[in-house]
Image (spheres, rainbow, N blue to C red):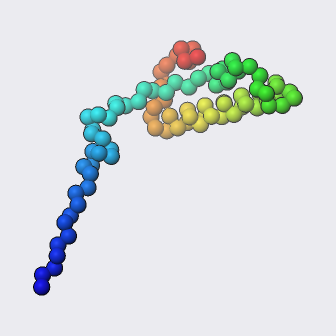
Amino acid sequence: MSRRRRARRQGPPPDAFWGRAEDRPGPPAPVIPTRDPAAIPRSLGDPPLSANPAAAQHHLSVVYEEAVKAATALAAANGLLDTGADPDDAA
C-alpha cells in the first residue's frame, strides 16, 4: 500500500511580513542633539511632585540630560550624529 502524501501548504510570501525593498524608507536624517533637554517640560510649569518644586524640577532636568546623553551616544555609535550642524539651529 502506498503512503498518502501530505499537501504542502504554501506559506505567505516573504514580503508579506518584511515588505518590499522598494517600499522601505530611505536612510534616517542625522541627529542633532539639543542644548537644553528640559526646555519643553520646563515650559509646562513646576511639577507637582514635592513640597519644593525647584528641587523636583532640578531632578527631572538631570533625568532629561541623561536621556539626551544616551540618545546622542546611540546616534554616534550608529553613524547618525550630525557633527557639522550649528548647535544654535537645533535649539
Give the image location of residue 4, x and y in percent: 17, 76
Q: Which residue lies at the image location 66% right of the left edge and 30% below the top edge?
A: 65
Which residue is farthest top? 89
Work out whether 81 lies above or below 42: below
Q: Is residue 49 left or right of residue 25?
A: right
Give the image location of residue 77, x and y in percent: 49, 38
Which residue is farthest right? 51
In the image, 48 versus 55, the foreground residue is 48
Work out whether 35 lies above or below 69: above
In the image, 74 versus 53, the foreground residue is 53
Q: Which residue lies at the image location 33% right of the left edge and 46% below the top edge?
A: 17
Q: Is residue 10 left or right of residue 88?
A: left
Q: Is residue 53 left or right of residue 72?
A: right
Q: Which residue lies at the image location 64% right of the left edge and 21% below the top edge?
A: 40
Image quarter for residue 60? top right
Give the image location of residue 41, x and y in percent: 68, 23
Give the image location of residue 55, x and y in percent: 82, 28
Q: Which residue lies at the image location 76% right of the left edge and 32% below the top edge?
A: 59
Which residue is farthest bottom? 1
In the image, 91 versus 87, the foreground residue is 91
Q: Quadrant of the C terminus?
A: top right
